[in-house]
Amino acid sequence: MKALSKCVKAFAGLSIVLLPAMGGNCVHAANPYLPLWEYIPDGEPYVFEDPDCPGKFRVYIYGSHDSRKTDYCGLEQVVWSAPVDDLNDWRYDGVIFESKTNAVGDTLNAGGTGDVLFAPDVAEVTGADGSKTYYLYPNNQSGGRNGMVAKASRPDGPFKVSNWSKENPCLTDGVFRFDPGVLVDDDGRVYGYWGFERSYAAEIDPATMATVKKGCDIVEDMIPSRDQDTTFRFFEASSMRKIKDKYVFVYSRWTNDGEFGLPATNYTLAYAYSDNPLGPFTYGGTIIDGRGRDTDADGKVIPTATPFGNTHGSIIEINGKWYVFYHRQSGTNEYARQAMVAPVNVTVEEGKGGKVVISEAEYTSEGFETDGLNPLKRYSAGIACYYTGPSEARHSYPDVYFPGSYVRPYYGDEERFEKPYDLSENVTPVVNNTAGSVVGYKYYNFTDTPVDTLVLDILPLGHDGHIDVMIDSPWEKKGGKKIGSLDISADMSQKRADMDVALSGMQGVSGKHAIYLVISSDTQSTPLFELYELMFK
């Protein structure tokens, strides 16, 4: 039996022990809420009973694993979990599944490799005797195994394939295709959802958890795709949740060109709802926009985070509070995606035709620190939620990453997985800080915390530059106020060092406020420094 009171696991041949503190630089609760060297996109959150502590419950995150560096996802899926009463204490529970061998134990693919595993889902089934079985849908997309299902007696696995074909041990039986989602209803009936650019659904045979129930049909275009209407615009990432008597379908939506004042994108999570698990559905709205859209000093809509990308996630209630789980891009591609979370409000009008209203979440650095970041805590710069460049072209060409600040993946793009799960450091820097860039953190809580200095851990890069520290907005015309400044000189030692920024006007400041670093220089389009950590004192 796994000793879940501890976290002792092995990954890539390394034995590791994750302790609650994980060193002075660990950020458990802020966004991204997992360690900054972990890349789990497509996270589906579930609350399951802790199998080692009956009566206690944990939140489990099931997602793909960006470990291939130059392409999506990985050959393994891992799980992290946290007790529902302490969402700061995330624990690595290990590899739960690898699709490597077929039904008779032969290697699936040439070269000894297994299948790439994309966005998964998990379902819990309770037997007549109260026992629980967990079904994992790992979303392989090769070799006739994209309908694969694996099961386990524990939410943290290990999971074993349960639907190998009797005719061909290299294939699996099942209807699921891209981005499977599964709902076990209150009456025990099972429903499946999947699709890429078109939405499909069906009632599933509970005996197989993989095939369409006899006498039932597949529902095509359960909600319309982007080519079929201008409202639902389904793209991918099917996820179903039941809230009271309503069925809430969360998915990646392709926005209309010009919607929200920005180009079209599939970087948003939206929802639709119905009185029935297979529809018809009513469109609800946007839950989270991964672009972190905002307006600039002149009121023009801009992306304040990575302007392009994909997303996948869902909503869940934990201890009476609702959250949306999603992911963001880090670096300059979509292959180092990080798990993110934000609170939302959910209201349901019960009864036939009742509405479901989910508030749109804000893209912030807070994560589970919903009362605001602690100014006296030393945070990695990588929790930045606002990073823009000087180029207005970012607004018009979202598929090109124009010069400007961004979060560099752990150990850099080329080396981030050379030391997997190294606990000696949990810092990802904000790099490419050029003239005109802005780096921001929403929100710090200054209640009962008087401060007069901001400490920036900076690596100068041999150029003259200047940083203005702003509170509430990067622009005075939108209510921002300059509270400090720091000069970066070309003759500074090019080594990381803490630099103190004297602050003014902070007396009496209380409550939650955003902090922005506005960067300027006579040297254009050249990185001036790298930012590693920050704290107030």
Image: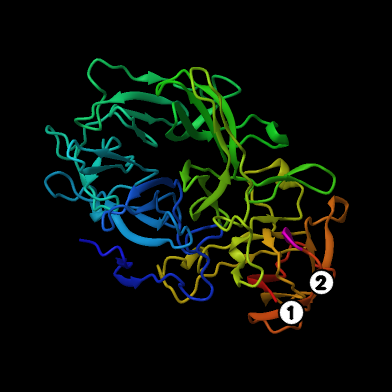
Q: Which residue appears at 34% of the width and 72% of the height?
A: 16
Q: Which residue appears at 60% of the width and 69% of the height?
A: 379
Residue 32: % across, % down: 53, 57
Magenta-colored stretch includes residue 227 = no
Query: Which residue is at the front of the view, 505 or 211?
Result: 505
Is 99 displayed left or right of 532 in the figure?
left
Residue type at numbered disc 2: Ser
Query: Which residue is at the front of the view, 199 or 355?
Result: 355
Label 2 sits on residue:
485
Residue 370: % across, % down: 59, 55
Q: Crowding at label 1, few (<14), some or many (≥20) Cα neighbours within 10 Å? A: some
Is 441 displayed left or right of 95 in the figure?
right
Q: Which residue appears at 30% of the width and 57% of the height?
A: 95
- Give the SS element for disc 2: strand
Q: Which of marks 2 and 1 is nearer the N terminus?
A: 2
For the C terminus, the image quarter is bottom right
Q: Which residue appears at 82% of the width and 42% of the height?
A: 299
Residue type at numbered disc 1: Asp
Q: Crowding at label 2, few (<14), some or many (≥20) Cα neighbours within 10 Å? A: some
- Between the C-alphas of marks 2 and 1, the distance is 10 Å
Residue 56: % across, % down: 34, 54
Most extreme residue toward the top is: 215
What's the magenta region?
510-515
Residue 450: % across, % down: 74, 72
- Give the SS element for disc 1: strand
Disc number placed over residue 500 in the picture, else none: 1
Magenta-colored stretch includes residue 513 = yes
